[in-house]
Image (cartoon, rainbow, N blue to C red):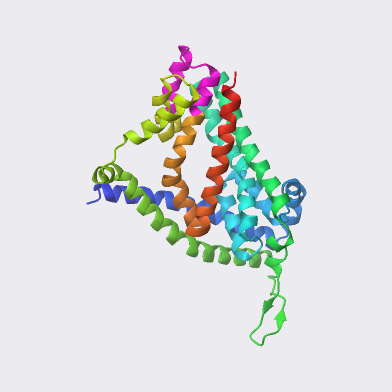
Amino acid sequence: MLGHPVVELLGEVLVRVLRIAVFLSVGVFLANLAVSFGLVEKIAVVSQYLTGPANLPDEVGTAILTTTASPTAGYGMLADFRESGVLDDRATLVAVTINTFFGFAQHIVTFYVPVLIPILGARVGVLYVTTRGLVALAITLTGIAAGALLLDGSNVDRGAMGEATTTDGGEESEPAEPETALGRVRDALGETREKLGEILPRLAGIYVVVALLVAYSEEILALAGGSGQALTAAADGLTGLLGLPGAAVPVVAAFALDTTSGAVVIAPLIENGTFTPRTAVATMLVGGIVSFAVSTFKRSIPFQYGIWGREFGSKVIAVNTGLKVGWIALALVLLLVP
């Protein structure tokens, strides 16, 4: 029974959800501590260059900078700010957009430098990582510009976390502040536990459904009359439109499903001259565009729906995907223009 494929799949989902739960709990806990101990004011000295022009409160800077260490924790903090009323939906979307470059920066240390650049070689690897970094930076700057143009005082409540509460008698009174550091930590833990109780069941349920659909995708496609050739057809259409070498099609297909595998496939084709550095990076970027459909279904939908719920999670996915595709398309134009 333990060796059954479905049981193994559910085990993998459990491990993934537990890992996310750890980072999410850290993010929410840090957000509560930052407010309780007044750390927001100290962090604001650094983050005000991001939050100020975007008309966002200082608290958001905590989440943005935390994303560099852990994107999951950063998202958890933003979710807490939205739930507490510090940010409305529009301001949250702007904050999520600004988060992009800082989430990318985390992957430079954990993946791009130790894994991808050695596979691709220094020249192509650095060019690809730099291009992706510039795309991420452009998205972050787009978020700052959007905040400057679209946000005002009605979109944020800078005093939401410390606002007065109403007593049973209808009179307003200041919430009792813990007098000791231990008391503040306990309060932060309690609020974190409550938040995880809201998010984790939803997150786990969505991940189970998506994992089962992915695992049995071939059978589902067969029943629906489809085939796995759709991905290759999409890659063929894009590479043909851009004038990339014919060898780009299998590279894009591999890159769309797994970044490391795509890099391994294209590396020898760079060495033998099939791809120039520019066409190699362009091919990998096309693979990134095609992969959005796969990664959105496998990772973004479960994660974003688990954090935000279906309605707002769909908005986050739409904004993220639209900006990535738009800026990557512009990068492709700049790379391939003679």
State whether residue 263 appears in this view.
no
Q: Residue 81 placed where, x, y %?
A: 63, 60
Q: Among all residues in the image, which is located at the extreme front?
A: 241
Q: Is residue 140 left or right of residue 196?
A: right
Q: Is residue 334 above or below residue 179?
A: above
Q: Nearer the viewer, residue 120 or 73?
A: 120
Count of labels shown?
Answer: 0
Q: Among all residues in the image, which is located at the extreme bottom?
A: 169
Q: Is residue 215 left or right of residue 158?
A: left
Residue at the image point whose x is 53% and y is 24% from the top: 281
Q: Residue 88 placed where, x, y %?
A: 63, 61
Q: Is residue 159 above or below residue 42?
A: below
Q: Main secondary structure of the magenta part?
A: helix
Q: Among all residues in the image, which is located at the extreme left?
A: 1
Magenta segment range? Answer: 261-284
State whether residue 239 appears in this view.
yes
Magenta segment includes 264: yes
Q: Is residue 293 left or right of residue 127?
A: left
Residue at the image point whose x is 40% and y is 49% from the top: 15
Q: Is residue 254 left or right of residue 58?
A: left
Please state, as top left, top right, bottom left or bottom right, where the C terminus lies in the image. top right
Q: Residue 183 placed where, x, y %?
A: 64, 68
Q: Residue 147 placed where, x, y %?
A: 69, 51
Residue at the image point whose x is 47% and y is 51% from the top: 303
Magenta segment includes 155: no
Q: Among all residues in the image, which is located at the extreme right?
A: 45
Residue at the image point whose x is 56% and y is 55% from the top: 76
Q: Is residue 111 above or below residue 246?
A: below
